[in-house]
Amino acid sequence: MVVTALLQNVATNAGVLVALVLVYAALSWPFEEADRQERARRINRRRLVCGLLFGLGAILTMNLPVTVVQGVIVDGKTVILSLAGAYLHPLGAGIALLVAGSYRWHLGGAGVVPGVAILVGVTLLGLVWGAQRKRLLRALGGPGSVYAGTLWLFSLGVACSALAVVLVLLLPAAIRLEVLQRVVLPVMLIFPPATLAFGWMFEGVLAYHARGRAINAMLREQARAAEVFLHARDGIVILDEDETFLDANPAFCAMTGFAREELLGRSLDVTRPTHFDPALKREVQRAIETKGHFEGNISRQRKNGEVFPCTVKMNVQRHADGRFKQCVVICTDQSEAKRYEEELKRVAHYDPLTGLPNRSQVLRELQAAMAREPGGVVAVVYADLDDFSQLNEQWGKAVGDQLICELGQHLKAGLLPHDTFGRVGGDEFVFVLPRPGDAPDVLRDIDQLANRLRQPVQALGHTAQLTASMGVTFYPQDSTDADTLLRHADLAMYSAKDLGKNQVQVFDPSRDARVQQRRATLLRIEQAMKVGELELFFQPKMRLSNGSLFGAEALLRWRHPERGLLAPGAFLDEITGTPFSEVLDRWVAECALRHVAQWREGGQVVAVSVNMAVPTLTAPGFIEFMEKLLLQFPQLPIYTLEIEILEYETMNDLALVAQTIERLFTLGVRVSIDDFGTGYSSLSYLQRLPAQFLKIDQSFVRDMLSSDTDRALVQAVIGLAQAFGREVVAEGVETHEHAAVLGAMGCDIVQGYGIARPMPAADLPAWVSGYRLPALVSA
């Protein structure tokens, strides 16, 4: 009977511990609620329940003690509370301790104090062991090591046993020694193995939950992948090793027009164009085999036969042993992007009013015509409508614009398929006429064009009888580049104007001697640039409001070995309109920034402006050149560089110039309209051209003190600039009185001999340090 009771009590204590493990397993499964507040409330309730159940389990074991030897009884409360401290949240462990400790205190007896102290001590040891669990497991061999887990649990049992033995010393002296002698061996033999055995059950629960969380995470990841697959805007397909469709998402089906069922089991070839490049197919296969992925632009074909551009990303997925698993292909339809790109090209290369080619596109077509007519002639005709501005003033701009459009369509209808007809200015047109014959034959076609142009044109209820002055040049008789051909035709057109308008004039290439001389001069200037004879002088620009340096304009000088120091007027005219003009403009920009970087190293921060021809700005590759140039000087602040362009040059292709200015501003480069007031200077012009500065022509500034007209013009330009939010720079300021009047008008930035003459780059820092704006101007 005694043995039976002993076994029953041992089994009951073990059963209580097993039950607590099961409770812990049930209550410690993670919540999945999205509501964080509700989740927090449930977790706190769980901790409370766990603490109460562990405390009640400890009470139950106290009522079913195990008699080891006569006078020595043990129970599972110590193991329960040590494991509560190790595996429960501190709140739950504290509740378990409170419940069990209160009951033990209620039982009373001689051993009440050490009994409660033992409960408190083992709970605290469990908390310490639990808090340091990961660190101790790593120190003992790693969290996944059986050896490490065993040592950790066994060390907890030994520590709790030792603490229990020590706290026996709190018993009354009369029984302390006797009890100590009886409990040491049983406690040290029973508690560590019990802690180890039941602790491994808790470890099993943790491992089970970890596996469950991993499985749930994997399932969530697969669900998210499925969501992405189903709802992605890009087309996604999965292929086997033979490029057979295993699956296709709705976006790909919508993109190609095939139903999913029509694709499954079929080859990828069904979406390839009929004339798909075999070399490209081999390139894709080679990339897949060698790199495991491919990315590029490939045409695809819809079910209806339409071919569309597509960006494709292909990635091969393999099994752990390297075997092919599947190939995932992501397809992005580039049709809209392509249409947008074509629209941008149209805006950049075609006149927005008439839809005809603009100057840059005409030049491209002219170059192409020159290349494909080796045995014939290419006529370049520059036509300017006579007195069209009077019609604009009489009938209004709307009628004038409509007349231009109607005339454009009327003239275009009389051309051959290979002819080019473009609008290069307000009322200026260019014809490129490739012909297999010679110049006299083409002149007959040009006369027909002139007669067609003289026919009445109707627009918005008005009928106009127009005429035009035409200039013509012929290639290859005029053997030069496309841009120069256009300028030669333009010169001939002005000759027609001078001779009374409404006629055709042919450019005379007999001036070849002058052309050759000009070429020789160009070669000499190119040589001067290479050998270092060209250099930059700088003329300061000052702010009147505070007397500070606003910047400096870079001005080109040629230190000629025989003729001395030459100003730009002595040689720049020979460069204008030539390909070397672009080369020189780029050299000036780079040289100017190099000087600015040198000044900055010496402690002077100076912004600089450079003069550039508009064809340089609108030439292909200019923006890319500026990006690379600015990257060479990363230490320079934004807006260090300013580009000055002549007002009259911008009118040839206003839309392209405006687009270039906007792109330059995004790079941190500002643009100034030089000689403002000498050209078009209209409200529409200012509205369409987003330049940041207007530079009043020096001829108006120089005479403003003696000419009421110039003074009024300067005041008008300043007011116009302020209305459009542009800053004004006045050049030609020769006296302090000029500066004072300009400051009173609202012009804050001035430049001229009254401030300083252009000086070598080496002299500018000293001048900046020593210059003080006179008090008259500052006031």
Image (spheres, grey):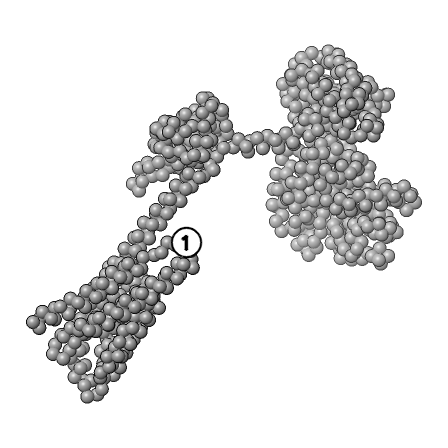
Question: Which residue occupies the foreground of this view, 64 or 442?
Answer: 64
Residues packed near mark 1 inside 10 Å, few (<14), some (14 to 19) or many (20 plus): few
Residue farthest toward the left in the current orientation of the protein: 1
Q: Where is residue 199 drawn, in percent x and y?
A: 24, 64
Q: Nearer the viewer, residue 649 or 105?
A: 105
Q: Quadrant of residue 592?
A: top right
Residue 696 lies, in percent from the top left, at 81, 43
Q: Looking at the image, which residue sits at the far right?
A: 706
Where 560 sits versus 637, above or below? above
- Residue type at the position of mark 1: Ala
Q: Position of residue 740 (x, y in %)?
A: 86, 52
Quadrant holding the N terminus: bottom left
User: For mark 1, what is the residue?
Assistant: 34
Locate residue 775: give its quadrant: bottom right
Viewer-proximal residue among 189 and 90: 90
- The residue located at (15%, 66%) in the rendering is 11
Viewer-proximal residue among 280 and 515 = 280
Instruction: Evaluate whether residue 532 shows in this view.
Output: no
Quarter of the image where the C terminus is located: bottom right
Q: Image quadrant of residue 444? A: top right
